[in-house]
Image: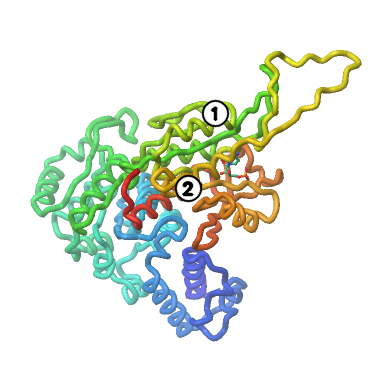
Amino acid sequence: MSGTAKQLLGEIEGFLAQFDITPSKFGVAAVNDGHLVAKLRKGSSVTLKTADRVRAYMASQRRAAPSQIACRATVPAAYRVLLIIGGGIAAYKCLDLIRRLRERGIAVRAVMTRAAQQFVTPLSVGALSNDRVFTELFDLDDEREIGHIRLSREADVIVVAPATADLLAKMAGGHADDLASSVLMATNKPVLVAPAMNPRMWLHPATRRNVAQLAADGIAFVGPNVGEMAERGEAGLGRMGEVPELIDAIASLLSSSAGASVSAKPLAGRHVLITSGPTQEAIDPVRYIANRSSGKQGSAIAVEAAALGARVTLVSGPTRLSDPAGVEVVHIESAREMLEAVRNALPADVAIFAAAVADWRVATQSDQKIKKSPGKNAPRLALVENPDILKAIAAERSGRRPGLVIGFAAETQNVIEFAQKKRKAKGADWIVANDVSPETGIMGGDRNAVHIISEEGVESWPELDKAEVARRLMARVASRFADARAEPA
Ligand code: C5P
């Protein structure tokens, strides 16, 4: 397989992943031969002319649907950050930074210096940013399609993290001998730098001069902080700022440059109410009916909602989990207690019903332990239906009904079809549907594969860990509130 074909296939695979489409949907408009991807995957070569046409097609699709690229599974990108990753051990923090920015609807495009690639790979950065990663100044394709001027033009702010002593020196001296420094020389956009280096390098007179020059040039700084260095026994001023600090600094730079409010805490001022875990329906003082729900998904959602700035009430059945920090947890046992706790917690902007509520309870609970006596038949348990909490809250009068009501649907067959019916029957706005047949291992496990069913249709997410499902779900919620600009409850 030729180098051109190999590179083109890599770009196409990235494109397919970005747009979440199969190869059969690719190429229709790009090339007459719809089997291009299949052939490339088998190792065929490709002419430069075809490669050009395919690249032009992908570029036009990206231009036409920037928000779709930004994060199909999260939120439309309102802002774009060009992240220049420098060569330092703190480069690993950029991976988390990219995720967190994208969760907030901020698209990230990355440029990596040669040294940065010693610490994190362009592959991981590209997978997280969902975009090409730019590394070379003299990459002919890049220069033709998207050069350093365009990289700068297409960003709202430029962030340099970690900003090494060398990168700061280059910036202060006006060097432009690689892609990162050329972008920084060519830009008229606000630039934020997050220095990270050994404390002695940070305190060196040369770095002091460079930092003073850059500050005078209008460059914004975040950190460095005092802390342990990667080198054994070294500590002092030089640790790169933590991701939340960087997010705050980026948000405030975006707010001032874009003239709009970009919140690092998009759910600040909102109340998010979550039910989670199983319910226990007592048979007698020692026995109960319960289910296998671990409460992990609901708890992860609570953590994420709090991280996005919401006031969070978690109404939880008995689980083995500890209470998430910064969340008000109301512990209940039965479905009726859960309903009462939920009603007490209203009003809320969002209600997410992740609990596995027992459908039935024992009609008459015994006050005393039911005795087993030899020769006597086993007791018969008469069951009555529990209140449907989701349905009840979704049916609350306007003003009391949360603006966004989200239910879960755990099914073992026909997942999407049953969940669509459930959304209507229960009056929920969205249903998060998953397959809990025993072979999936979802019930009680750490991973989840869900479909989001809403009025707009079905969005299927790949299998993710429950924390990632929570992040994506809450990013979707935040984006919905950003779109609606609804008044807090
Ligand atoms: O009817 P089913 O249990 O499949 O519905 C699932 C959704 O309804 C979940 O969001 C669950 O938390 C909610 N539910 C409820 N009260 C019930 C039963 C289910 O809130 N009694």
Q: CA distance from mark 1 to mark 2?
A: 20 Å
The location of residue 75, given as percent across then percent down, is 40, 57
Q: Evaluate whether residue 463 shows in this view.
A: no
Question: Of the residues shown, which amino acid type is indicated by label 2?
Answer: Val
The location of residue 300, given as percent across then percent down, is 48, 39
The location of residue 369, given as percent across then percent down, is 72, 14
Residue drawn at point x = 68 percent, y = 15 percent: 367
Residue drawn at point x = 38 percent, y = 60 percent: 76
Badge 1 residue CB within 8 Å of ligand 1: no
Badge 2 residue CB within 8 Å of ligand 1: no
Camera-side residue of 104 and 381: 381
Q: Evaluate whether residue 218 shows in this view.
A: yes
**Residue 174 - label:** none
The residue labelled by disc 2 is 405
The residue labelled by disc 1 is 337
Residue drawn at point x = 25 percent, y = 57 percent: 158
Residue 204 vs 146, above or below: the answer is above
Screen quadrant of the N terminus: bottom right
What is the crowding at mark 1: few (fewer than 14 residues within 10 Å), some, or many (at least 20)? some
Camera-side residue of 107 and 367: 367
Q: Secondary structure at mark 2?
A: strand
